[in-house]
Amino acid sequence: MTEQRPSEQRPHQFERGTDGPKVIVVGVDGSDSSLRAAAYAAGLARRQGALLAMVYVQPVLAAGAALGVPVADTTDEVAEGLIEEIRASAERVKGIFEVRWQFHTLRGDPYSGLVSAAEELTADAVVVGASEQAGHRLIGSVAVRLVKAGRWPVTVVP
């Protein structure tokens, strides 16, 4: 009988988290909990030498558009504000706290956007802030849906 090595038993597949995370995705939307999640994820990324991918998913509100509300302009302003806040924070800690980071903006619902970003970036971990909306206890928050998806380790920051 010939002994097979583990590499001969099955084709090589991408493994997440074998040497620590290389890409950490964090959802940001300007809320206090998302900013705490970003700070937490930045610390993880610094300690692991990982890329921090900050993702803002611009909501698409059909009802707002029907009422003549410039939804895209408003969410573009939120994205611009977030990127400026991130750049200012990175500049304040430059030389003390170095993190490789990227900022991504997508349109759609937050859950689908974070899933798409995590898949595209081959994320090893996802970090989100706890929902601040009471209704999410009934229908499920983005964090709960990400955990239930079971594709990545998910950290929920209060």
Image: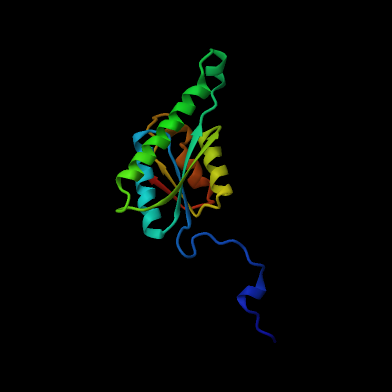
Instruction: Tell me if residue 157 can be seen.
Output: no
Which quarter of the rendered picture does the C terminus lie within? top left
- Viewer-proximal residue among 107 and 151: 107
- Viewer-proximal residue among 67 and 72: 72
Q: Is residue 147 above or below residue 49?
A: above
Q: Tag count in the figure?
A: 0
* Rendering colour mode: rainbow
Q: Quadrant of residue 62?
A: top right
Q: Which residue: 50% across, 23% down?
A: 73
Looking at the picture, how far across and down is residue 36, in whole percent? Answer: 34, 42
Q: Is residue 122 above or below residue 38?
A: below
Q: Is residue 66 above or below residue 148?
A: above
Which quarter of the rendered picture does the N terminus lie within? bottom right
Instruction: Tell me if residue 80 can be seen.
Output: yes
Q: Which residue: 33% across, 42% down?
A: 89
Q: Which residue: 56% across, 38% down?
A: 112
Q: Farthest residue toward the bottom?
A: 1
Task: Judge left or right: residue 117 versus residue 24.
Answer: right
Looking at the picture, how far across and down is residue 60, in whole percent? Answer: 55, 26
Looking at the picture, how far across and down is residue 3, in whole percent? Answer: 65, 83
Task: Judge left or right: residue 7 versus residue 131.
Answer: right
Q: Farthest residue toward the right?
A: 1
Task: Judge left or right: residue 122 versus residue 84.
Answer: right
Looking at the picture, how far across and down is residue 118, in whole percent? Answer: 53, 47
